[in-house]
Image (spheres, rainbow, N blue to C red):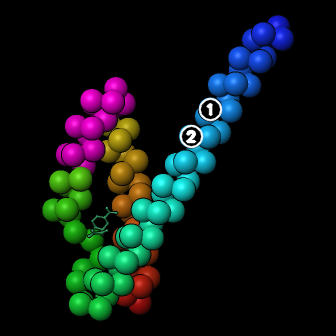
């Protein structure tokens, strides 16, 4: 690898590192809000999951993914993965 290529690789990876850090902060912020929802649901004896809300979000995010040139199937898998974790948290809060 030439020095120029190595420098370019490092520069690109530095951008990736910044984006990964932003993703972690954004996810942490999202989980703070979903924990609030979980506490509210537990207080009012509401079920941990809301499939209708999930469906609306998946539809919305798939549309946003298309506009952003991101694979909508990936966006759907990612959201489902996050939501599954949120539901686990809500079940824990409910006890
Ligand atoms: C956060 C909620 O609880 C669950 C988690 C969701 C999410 O992570 O977006 C969406 C719907 C629910 O299944 C909610 O009901 O708003």
Residue 14 x, y percent position in the rendering: 68, 32
Let me know if residue 85 appears in the view.
Answer: no
Rendered view: 67 above or below 58: above
Q: Which residues are magenta?
A: 58-71
Residue 66 in the image: x percent, y percent? 27, 30
How far from the left and from the top, in percent, is residue 80? 35, 54
Q: Main secondary structure of the magenta part?
A: helix
- Judged from the image, the quadrant occupied by ligand 1 is bottom left
Q: Is residue 26 above or below residue 67?
A: below
- Mark 1 surroundings within 10 Å by alpha-carbon count, few (fewer than 14), some (14 through 19), many (20 or more): few
Residue sitting at x 37%, y 70%: 34
Residue name at image x 40 percent, y 47 percent: 78
The one nearer the camera, 22 or 31, is 22
Query: Quadrant of the rendered structure where residue 41 is?
Result: bottom left
Instruction: Give SS at disc 1.
Output: helix
Q: Quadrant of the C terminus?
A: bottom left
Mark 2 Cβ inside 8 Å of ligand 1: no
Question: Which residue occupies 27% across, 71% down?
Answer: 49
- Tell me the distance, in whole angstroms, between the alpha carbons under discs 2 and 1: 6 Å
Q: Quadrant of residue 39?
A: bottom left
Q: Which residue is mark 2?
A: 19
Total numbered labels placed on residues in the image:
2
Q: Quadrant of the N terminus?
A: top right
Residue under label 1, please give it.
Answer: 15
């Amino acid at each position: 690898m030439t020095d120029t290529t190595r420098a370019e690789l490092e520069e690109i990876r530095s951008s990736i590192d910044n984006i990964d850090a932003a993703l972690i902060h954004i996810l942490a912020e999202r989980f703070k809000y979903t924990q609030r929802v979980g506490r509210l649901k537990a207080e009012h004896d509401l079920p941990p999951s809301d499939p209708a809300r999930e469906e609306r979000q998946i539809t919305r995010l798939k549309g946003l993914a298309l506009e952003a040139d991101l694979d909508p199937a990936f966006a759907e898998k990612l959201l489902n993965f996050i939501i599954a974790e949120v539901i686990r948290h809500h079940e824990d809060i409910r006890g």
